Amino acid sequence: MGILGGILALPVLGPIKGVLWVARTIEQQANAERWDEGKVTGGLQELELDLDLGKIDIEEYEAREAVLLQQLKEIGEAKND
């Protein structure tokens, strides 16, 4: 596509490229947060504090802890690959 084709296609392709850029940026941010080991360990500390303060009971603690520990395991496995 030459310069003229690019100019004529801009009203159609411009917004599409913008939406794709936003989608890629959101995906990158979501992946960065999901694979952030510090965030997960912070969540474990906060969870323990909630248990100590009596905000949650032991059953809820154990269920949420299992999820966070599984996330840590997945992060560790991803780093080793």
Image (tube, helix red, strand yellow):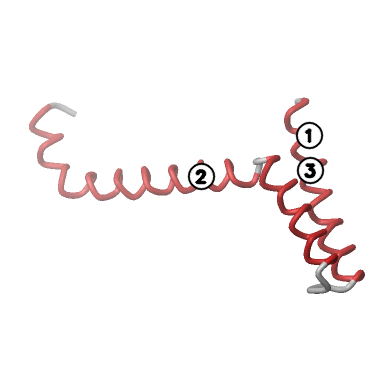
Query: How far, Cα to Cα, is label 2 from label 1?
Result: 19 Å
On the picture, is 53 further left or further right than 21?
Answer: right
Decide: marks 1, 3 in contact (CB < 8 A)? yes
**Label 1 secondary element:** helix
Q: Is residue 1 above or below residue 73?
A: above
Nearest to the observer: residue 78 or residue 39: 39
Three-letter amino acid code of the residue under disc 1: Gly
Nearest to the observer: residue 66 or residue 6: 66
Residue at image x 71%, y 49%? 42
Q: Residues within 10 Å of mark 3 (few under 14, many from 20)?
A: some
Label of residue 72 in the image: 3
Quadrant of residue 64 in the image? bottom right
Residue at image x 64%, y 46%? 34
Label of residue 29 in the image: 2
**Label 2 secondary element:** helix
Residue at image x 77%, y 52%? 45
